Image (spheres, grey):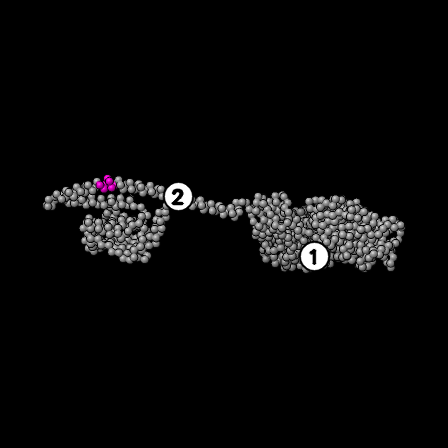
Amino acid sequence: MPEDTVQALAETGDGYLWIGTTGGLTRFDGMRFVLNGSNTLPSPGVNSIFCLSPSRDGSLWIGTEGGGLLRLLNGSVKHYGEEEGLTDGFVRSVFEDHRGTLWIGTDSGLFRVEGDRVKRIGRADAKGPLAVHEISEDSIGKIWVGGSRLLSIEGEEIHFYDLPGSYSSNRVKAVLQTTDGTVWVGTVSGLERLSRGKFEAVPALRGTVRALMQTSDGTLWIGTIGDGVWTYRDGVFSHLRGLLPGNTVLRIFEDSSHQIWFGLVGGLVRLSRTPVRVVPLPGGSDSDYETISGDGDGSLWVVASGVYRVVDGIALPYRFRKLPEVRIRNIFRGRDGDLWIGTDGTGAYRLTPHGIVHYSAPSELTNNFIRAFLEGRNGDMWIATDEGVSLLTRQSVRKLTMADGLVHFSTRSLLEDDKGDIWIGTDQGLSRWHQNGFAHDAATEALQNEKVWAIYEDPTHTIWFGTRDHGLFRYQNGRIAQFTTVQGLASNSIYQILEDPQRRLWLSGPNSISSLSEPQLNGSSEGGGHLSVSVYPMPYGAEDAQMYGGRQPSGYLDPNGSVWFPSSKGAVQVLLNDKFVPGLPRLLLENVTLDGRTLPLTGLVQLPSRMTRLEFSYAPLSLRPQTGIRYQYKLEGFDRNWVYAGTNLSASYTNLPAGTYRFRVQAFEVNNPTLLTEASIEVRRSPFFWQRWWFLLLCTTALLLLTWAVYRLRMHQVRLRFRAVFEERERLAREMHDTVIQGCTSVSALLEAVASLQPQTKDPKDDLLHHAREQVRTTIDEARHAVWNLRHEDGAAVDLNASIAAISAQTLRDFGVTVSHPVNGEAYSVPGAVSRELLMVVREAIYNAILHGHPTQITVAIRYETKQLCLLVIDDGVGFKPGGVPVDHHYGITGMQERMEQLGGTFAMESEPGSGTQVKLTIERSILSSKAEHGRRWAIS
């Protein structure tokens, strides 16, 4: 706040509390104060605010000291001064009646707003000008005006009232009619009330009464100058001494959640309804430790810097007369009535009817600093100290330390379970004493590094462990489960665990007291939903109270219907039968910041393409304490699940992809996590230009065009290479024709000429000459075949039937063997490359038949079948045995097989001695189609 002196309080319809101070105007949302003149609020231009009045149209009327009247509406301020008819700038009271008429009280008269003008009501009389400090309305619509005079206005009639006392002592500061019809008037000399048509002074109050307020429960609150606050209820006046930090009360106000606010010279005070009360310890609060325990007779022992006995809600110092001067840590009442007292350095004392028994180290105790007592079912006494545990039985004393198996020397808590085992919580793990020895189980394993400050066993024999840092652990059926603030606990530090008759577990922590249903916890798992947890706000004056733990007992369940915990402010009592459930706050999205820059919250929030960090800030709008409110958020389109935020009031995102998102934030009370309130906003991040659809389409089109261009270029290069290869083949063919073939032809002609000149008689040389002639013919024929292959492109079409007919004619001329060539089926197109390979195989088969089989007849049959093309070469020669294939130094059978394999076809040969030979060539029609398509692609220019 700009200054501490609070003169005016008002709550507007949107839930904000407005605070007028001598230094300016402030708005409060339950968590933060926003000063007048900041980036959020317009400045009214005047510092000292004396009165505030919200209007039914949503505006806030502001009365200033010297600056006239201001109207704040939708972020704009309108000023009313002399030009509008308001002749006095010192506005002391602003009030809107049930008709909507706005009344203004100033130091020099009463005014009324009519449209955009201000009209004076009444004129000065013999007693001087009317100074107005208070305006109110009673149940019948009569307007009461108090200041230098007291008067009422009903219609056009004005009635003046005389108050007891002198003129200077009966100046009016407050006027109020309570629900019972009584009109109360606060003056500079005390409190007056209207009785039988006359005002009578209330004897109980003397001094200036500045503020009057009747709260929703019917209590009349009276604020005075210098005498603090009073209440009037059921005919009784009560002076609440010490309730407030100051005795000068300038304003009293009750908000919509029934909290009472006090404007003081020294600040602002809020009184909230809570089932928690604090019993102060005279001179004993704020010590370095504190324990609390019951004594069976309804009283309590509280140990802090001294010993206190609490009886009927009042703590009184207590001294044990027979006990020496020792510093006490804790007190425990045994079942036999003996009182055990633990000290801070002098061991333990047992107060019995027969005297005092002292136990100390090293004879009976491991250490003289006592932290906890536990009486076993068999009457044995366990004493936990700073350095181990001592067991006192009727017959002996046993000291247990780390040398005996204790997990850690610094012990904090003790419990005996239903089986008789003793659980010992330490600052570094958990130990279990079982049948005269330490045993290990799942609990000791899971909590081996934990600070175990509280242990409790519920009626179902489930054991609960409260840790200093990591929440609550449940040991049930041999299994451990952990509960933390993620599941809804108020704190991860557990100082004490208690259970009331309604089976609610009570947990204390460093600065919180909470409760939750024990059956709810027993039916929940670690990964379950949010727990329903009730958090109890501390009363006024103890908001910053710190709970104590680590020394037992640090909590007590009173059979009379309350739980007690030690705190830095005294003994804290929570009433079990007070079922106070606060309402959910309204949730507001305060701002959206992008890389530190605040964005306007108008509809869809546009985000630029170049951004780094996006942050959403939200806040609850509730004037109540918000200790039990938790939050979760989700950015739809980015987050898959809700993100638990706890009490954090912001959410940030980095590297957010382009797109449209909706940010949702929910608030809930931990005591009812299923009841939610929500706020949301939509944001859209613009994509970079290379992420837009037209750019992607353009890039895709360019890529396709580039791919097509590269393909065309590649095809052109391949065709050029192919053409160069073909030209080279033609050159080689010409060279072979002009050299090799021509030379061989000449040699053949010479040999034929020599053969024609030979005599008729048989000579061995004739055979050699004959073979030479045959060999030359063969060489010439093969060379022609090679030249023919070189001169033809793969893609050129070849007539298969005509080519086989030509081979048949050539065979008849060269060798005198008749070759028939029948055709079966309807001919279809065969790619040129395939046809030439088939012709080469057929030519080789015919040549082999003539050379090795000596046939008289050869048949080359062509079968155009639906699924395949089949060629048969059949001769009636001598044949050969299977496996006795003749050796061929030219193409031979191996060459024919290789050619057919390259085509993707099959080669088969059948022969029997004396029965001739059959060669079968087949190729699937699908292969012919694929090769034809391949040939067409290569032929495209």
Left or right position of 892 against 574: left
Whether residue 366 is in magenta: the answer is no
Label 2 SS? helix
Whether residue 738 is in magenta: the answer is yes
Q: Which residues are magenta?
A: 736-742
Residue 845 seen: no
Crowding near the residue tagged with mark 1, few <14, some 14–19, many ≥20 C-alpha atoms within 10 Å: few
Left or right position of 611 against 32: left
Quadrant for the C terminus in the image: top left
Residue 791, given in percent of the width and then of the height, sits at: 28, 44
Quadrant for the N terminus in the image: top right
Q: Where, by quadrant of the figure, is residue 525 drawn?
A: bottom right
Q: Earlier in the sequence, mark 2 or mark 1?
A: 1
Q: Main secondary structure of the magenta part?
A: helix
Label 1 SS? loop
Residue 737, given in percent of the width and then of the height, sits at: 24, 41
Left or right position of 606 against 844: right
Which label was assigned to residue 474? none
Mark 1 lies on residue: 581
Task: Give the residue type that dot 1 points to.
Answer: Val
Mark 2 lies on residue: 714
Between 545 and 629, the one lying in front of the other is 629
Between 650 and 780, the one lying in front of the other is 780
Task: Give the residue type that dot 2 points to.
Answer: Arg
